[in-house]
Image: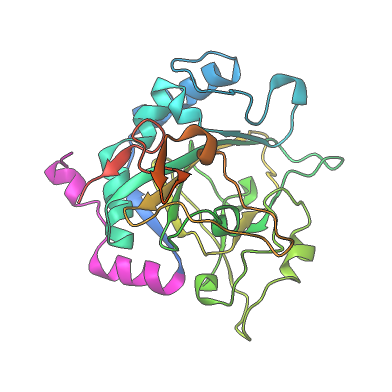
Amino acid sequence: MQLTEEELLLLPTDEDVAFYRAHGYYKSLKLFTAAEIDAAIAGSERYYAGERDFSLPGDARGWRPEHGNVLRKNDYASLQNRELAALVRKPLLGAVAARLCGAPIRLWHDQLLYKPTSNPEKAANVGWHTDRGYWKTCSSAQMLTAWIPFHDCDERMGTITMIDQSHEWPDNTEGLDFFSNDLQGLEKKFKTGGRPVIKVPVNLAKGEVSFHSCLTIHGSGPNLTPNPRRSIAVHMQDESNHFQVHRYADGTLARHPNDLLCRHQEQDGQSYPDYTDPAICPQLWPR
C-alpha cells in the first residue's frame, strides 16, 4: 500500500491530529474523486436491488425493499459489493485513520446508510450514541469511524453532528441509542462530568470525510431536502484490538455479528473470534 505525492498532501497534519485527539473528531480534505463517489452510488443501487458480487453468510442484515421508504442501514455492504469495497479499501482512507489514532488499521465493519426526506409521520433521525456502546467485545478504545457522504451534505440534509470533546466525558456507552428518533430525550441522558454540551454539525463537500473516535457521542437530525442523504460508515479497528469477554449488568454476554462471521482461534481451551480474519476484517493500512 503506497500513496502518491498528491495523496500524501491530504494526510492530517500534526495540528489536525492534535485536534482529533482533543475534540474527538476530524474533517478531512477531499479524499475521494467525484468518479469514485459516483461509482459507490451505482454500487449501492445494485446492492439495494439485491445484486451481490461476493457472498456473505446470512445476508439479511438491515433494510430490504419491503421495509419501505425509511431510514436504511445495511451492515457489511462492502464485503458484498465491488464498488463499495473499492471505496472502503482505498489506501488513503486507511492512512488517514492510521495517522489519527497512531496505529495500523483494519476494517471492523461498514454500514451503508440512506436517510429519506423528512416525513412528519415517520421521523428518520439517527439517535445520539457512541460506537463503542455497540462494540463491547472489543478490547480497544482507540477504534474510530469514517463517515463518507455520497454528495455535499450540510445541516439541512441532516449531516452527522458531533458532541465536542465527549470522548473525554465519563462513560456514555450505555443508555444512548442509534435507532431512537428522540434526540432531546437522549441528550438528557448524557453524562457530561459537568462539561458543556457543544453540538458541531460537520458540513462536508462531496469527497470529504468525517472521522470520529468510538467514544465520541454523535447523531443526526432530519433530512429537510427533497433528496435522500446517502452515505457509508466505515468502522475501523487499530492493530491492538482483539476479542474480550464482556458481561452486561444482568449477566448476559455481549455479542457482535463479527463473532459469527470471523474465523475462530483456540486459547486456554476456549474458542474466540479472531478480529484479524482477513476475509472479514482486512487490513486497510499497515504499520
Dividing the image into 4 quarters, which one contains the N terminus?
top left
Q: Position of residue 281 (x, y in %)?
A: 39, 38
Q: Position of residue 171 (x, y in %)?
A: 59, 72
Range covered by the magenta-colored residues: 1-23
Side of 214 relative to 90 (left or right): right
* Magenta span includes 14: yes
Look at the image and name its color scheme: rainbow
Could you say which is closer to the camera, residue 265 or residue 117? 265
Q: Residue 30 at what x, y percent from top left? A: 33, 46
Query: Magenta segment, principal secondary structure?
Result: helix
Question: Residue drawn 18% across and 50% down?
Answer: 8
Give the residue drawn at x 31%, y 53%: 239
Nearer to me, 186 or 220 = 186
Residue at 35% in and 42% down? 276
Looking at the image, which residue sits at the far front?
Answer: 269
215 to the left or right of 286: right
The quarter holding residue 90 reads top left
How many tags in the picture? 0
Q: Position of residue 15 (x, y in %)?
A: 28, 70
Question: In this rendering, does residue 232 appear at all?
Answer: no
Residue extending farthest to the left is 5
- In screen coordinates, is 110 left or right of 102? right
